[in-house]
Amino acid sequence: MTQIAFIGLGNMGGPMAANLVKAGHGVAGFDLSEASLKAAAEAGVTACASLQDAVKGAEAVITMLPKGEHVIAVWQQLTSLAPAGTLLIDCSTIDVDSARKAHLMAGADKCPSLDAPVSGGTGGAAAGTLTFMAGGSDEAFARAKPLLEAMGKKIVHCGGDGAGQAAKICNNMILGVSMIAVCEAFALGEKLGLSHQALFDVASTSSGQCWSLTSYCPVPGPVPTSPANNDYKPGFAAALMLKDLMLSQDAASASGASTPLGAAAAKLYEAFGEKGNGSRDFSAIIEMLR
Ligand code: NAD
């Protein structure tokens, strides 16, 4: 059993902390939102009134926060609150530069650290089936692995500091681009008189096969569990897709990588969001593309 402080108990962090409790760990949680704290307490997390209270006695601290600025602000406080040797893990999706800055702050305080963003959404968080992409030292990864295994089914050590965030934004750039390609194919098929089922039956077993088609098919029918069958309730919200595409675009500019399709996908999701669609599933972009 490990004593863990869990900071950020929202849609993802709440169920992740609950799975750590189920696995027998001691979890003290803190969130700025009373509602999130209350829900976590109902799942067995010890609700704390401050970051300081949550971190007291913790061998590991996990953060699951909205953006890089939130992670940096919390980790800045952690470096004075957590004694040397405390394992610091950030599971939020943030920019690679902030992730590396957080590692540097932890290193200066002699705390092993890991960036470990996730894939799998709120469903995966609740079921404990997330994929973790980790960046950091071998020591930090070895200590974190048993904790991550309580929340996920696939744990990949991608490399040094920031490598987890790099893997996450590259993967999600593929996701954004592939969803738009699948939507365009269905929209073209409709104009050509092709049924949704016929296109699905061919593409899902041919070279057009991809996750956006077979798990999140953007038209109702072929994949009964896809958000298209549920009025495009997320699922994976379009605003989060845009956030991840912007992170990959920032990283592409900073590193000099050429990502013309990633740039086009970011523009399309930006336009989709401006039309008030940010909270709908990202597959609903087919309506704008038709
Ligand atoms: P969320 O908004 O539901 O939760 C974030 C929580 O952090 C909120 O409860 C907020 O009150 C809390 N918070 C903010 N600042 C804080 C602070 N200083 N101290 C304590 N608590 C603070 O967001 P979420 O959906 O849980 O996402 C969290 C992260 O996971 C994001 O980086 C997101 O991009 C990433 N992510 C989300 C999904 C998804 O499907 N929701 C999937 C993969 C990754």
Image: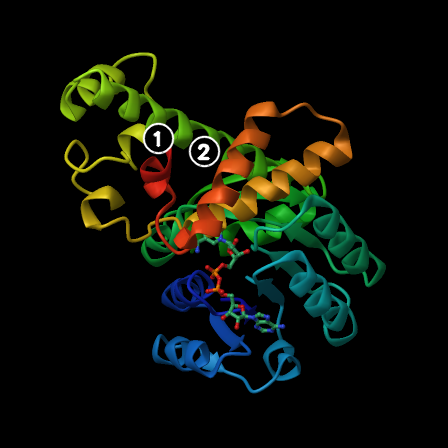
**Is residue 159 at all visible to an observer of this figure?**
no
Q: Is residue 1 left or right of residue 230?
A: right
* The quadrant where residue 169 appears: top right
Q: Is residue 279 left or right of residue 1?
A: left
- The x and y percentages for residue 178 are 42, 27
Q: Amino acid at mark 2?
A: Leu
Q: Amino acid at mark 1?
A: Trp
Of residue 227 and residue 275, the one placed in the foreground of this image is 275
Q: Is residue 109 above or below residue 130?
A: below
Of residue 5 and residue 280, the one placed in the foreground of this image is 280
Q: Residue furthest top?
A: 207
* The quadrant where residue 67 appears: bottom right
* The quadrant where residue 213 appears: top left
- The x and y percentages for residue 143 are 61, 53
- The circle drawn on residue 257 is none
- The circle drawn on residue 211 is 1
Instruction: Count neighbours of disc 1 (C-alpha within 10 A) and say few if under 14, some if 14 to 19, many if 20 or more.
Output: few
Q: Sequence order check: which comes first, mark 1 or mark 2?
A: 2
Q: CA distance from mark 1 to mark 2?
A: 8 Å
Q: Is residue 152 left or right of residue 84?
A: left
Looking at the rendered structure, the secondary structure element under dot 1 is helix
Looking at the rendered structure, the secondary structure element under dot 2 is helix
Of residue 271 and residue 180, the one placed in the foreground of this image is 271
Instruction: Count neighbours of disc 2 (C-alpha within 10 A) and say few if under 14, some if 14 to 19, many if 20 or more.
Output: many
Would you say the residues marked 1 and 2 are in contact, meaning their CB atoms lie under 8 Å apart? yes
Instruction: State the residue position of label 2.
Output: 175
- The x and y percentages for residue 225 are 20, 43
Q: Is residue 14 above or below residue 253?
A: below
**Is residue 232 at all visible to an observer of this figure?**
yes
Q: Colour scheme in the image?
A: rainbow
